[in-house]
Amino acid sequence: MHPENTAGTEALILKSYIEGRWVTGKGTGHGLVNPTNGRIVATCSTEGIDFRNALAFSRTAGGPALRALTFSERAGLLGKVADALAGRRDRWFEIARINSGNTKADAAIDIDGAIGTLKYFARLGAGLGESKTLVEGQPARLSRDPNFQAIHIGVPVKGVAVHINAYNFPAWGLWAKAAVSLLAGVPVFAKPATATAWLAQEMVQCVIESGVLPDGTLSIACGSARDLLEHLQFGDVVSFTGSATTGQMVRSHPAILARGVRVNVEADSLNAAILGPDADAGSPAFEFFTREVVKEMTVKAGQKCTAIRRILVPTGQAAAVSDAIRAQLERVTVGDPGNEGVGMGPLVNMTRRVAVEEGIRKLASASETVYWANPLKLVDADTEKGAFVSPILLHVRSGEDAPVANELEVFGPVGTLIPYRDKLDAFSIAERGGGSLAASVFSADSAFLSEAALELAPSHGRILLVDPSIGNAHTGHGIVMPSCIHGGPGRAGGGEELGALRGLWFYHQRVGVQASATTLTSITQQGTNPATSAS
Ligand code: NAP
């Protein structure tokens, strides 16, 4: 074990939990680093793991065990998983600091977000009661004889849910997907991103050791996915989170296409925040807007899929907004996330730093740089060894001026200020992101806010409308709430996750059942209607 793993001198070797036992992959595997100093803290490998057998075990052991339980019994399991994880919260924060470069505030979004989401679905699931089937809507009459009717019901798919996650949320990514899948009655096969698999792996180990989950309901592969997708079958589902490029590859994998495996993709996104035409410098909407932009740019060093990338402001306010954001960015301290005075830590590793620096060069070549701390002054860290970049604010002249600002997601603390002429121009620039996860609009004019919502809706998954009455109460542009859907159209992947009980449908087969009223009644009496359950 590496000293940072609490004892010894060797890097920790992360095992995978496959077919109900812990296994170590062959070879040296991939190194996971501490991005603050570049030291390797753990390694992992999936070489030699038989993914065919691994998935088969989840299907044959985990699936039946979960399907035998009612929604409320599965919800009980989620509650116990949350309790087990909450008991070791300090450890999760330690790993997030060491392996993800997270400050406490960064880690809280991931870790408390994970535990909170599990608890949320435990509560919702309890409200579904002692049933195992979803019932949708009311019976519909199909013919002249009123006795012949139809209803739609949902039953859990009989396969395994393969959850492929991005590196930036090793805890929330894992448990937000697992909560819904387990509640739906579908076993989980988690594939965390290798760079930060340590936190996911140790959390899974904690839950397995707590003994709350039936065999086969939770597995984890730490390391490369190798031939995992080749062994998918009809009835399996894949929920992918990551870059658009990998998402496309997953979506078009021959086994997935040939066997009709259902896929949900959460990919990258060029989220916009819009300052309303009414919000002059110094107004509450203006202040809430600039504060939110700076928070979104710097939390997790900008490594949030929902982070604000494009800052849309009325042309007449561009200078004032730029001054206000720059002044706040100047106060952000960058360095070792273990130092309480540090506001922003490093990116996840040097590979990502190189990619972000390359992206910044592309964006900056088409824009004016408003803020960039160069040289970057670090607290308790060395710029040669750590994966640090400065927060950067760029400025283009108009929405048409720099297409790259609407097309290139730079996954770091980078925002581009884009002035708009009028409200229609603002909506059109937002839409040029090609489909985004989230947009936020700041204004004191509720007519403008509601118009913005309807205009932005076709190209977004979630819209946050901030008038001053909720300036301090809202949960944040970039925070995914389990009660709201997460996902976005177009380049954001076209996926949809969470959203309270809506998320259950991804793991269910929806089927139309046509029969006599009596027969339908006997089916529906065994089910539960998520739209009317206590939630
Ligand atoms: P990534 O490189 O696309 O990797 C995502 C996941 O796919 C990782 O677990 C990766 O495993 C796995 N993967 C890679 N090749 C695979 C293959 N051939 N078969 C199966 N799985 C494979 O993304 P990332 O760098 O981890 O995350 C950053 C990106 O994710 C950003 O673009 C961000 O916008 C996006 N993101 C989106 C959301 C959202 O909800 N929409 C949330 C977070 C992040 P390895 O790590 O082993 O390569």
Image (cartoon, helix red, strand yellow):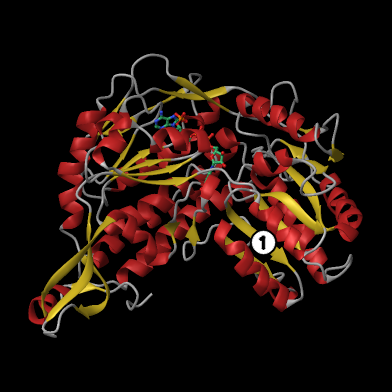
Q: Is residue 49 above or below residue 476?
A: above
Q: Left or right of 394: which side holds 263?
A: left
Residue farthest top in this picture: 27
Quarter of the image for residue 380 reads top right
Q: How many marks?
A: 1
Q: Is residue 335 above or below residue 11?
A: below
Between 506 and 211, which is closer to the camera in this rendering?
A: 506
Quarter of the image for residue 120 reads bottom left
Q: Left or right of 278: which side holds 106?
A: left
Q: Residue 502: horizontal and vertical position, in percent? A: 38, 64
Visible in this render: residue 79? no
Residue farthest front in this picture: 144
In the image, what residue type sits under mark 1?
Answer: Ser
Visible in this render: residue 298? yes
Q: Residue 328: horizontal and vertical position, in percent? A: 84, 51
- Secondary element at tag 1: strand
Determine which residue is flagged by label 1: 440
Quarter of the image for residue 192 reads top left
Which residue occupies 39% across, 22% down?
A: 45
Q: Residue 129: horizontal and vertical position, in percent? A: 25, 72
Q: Left or right of 113: which side holds 178?
A: left
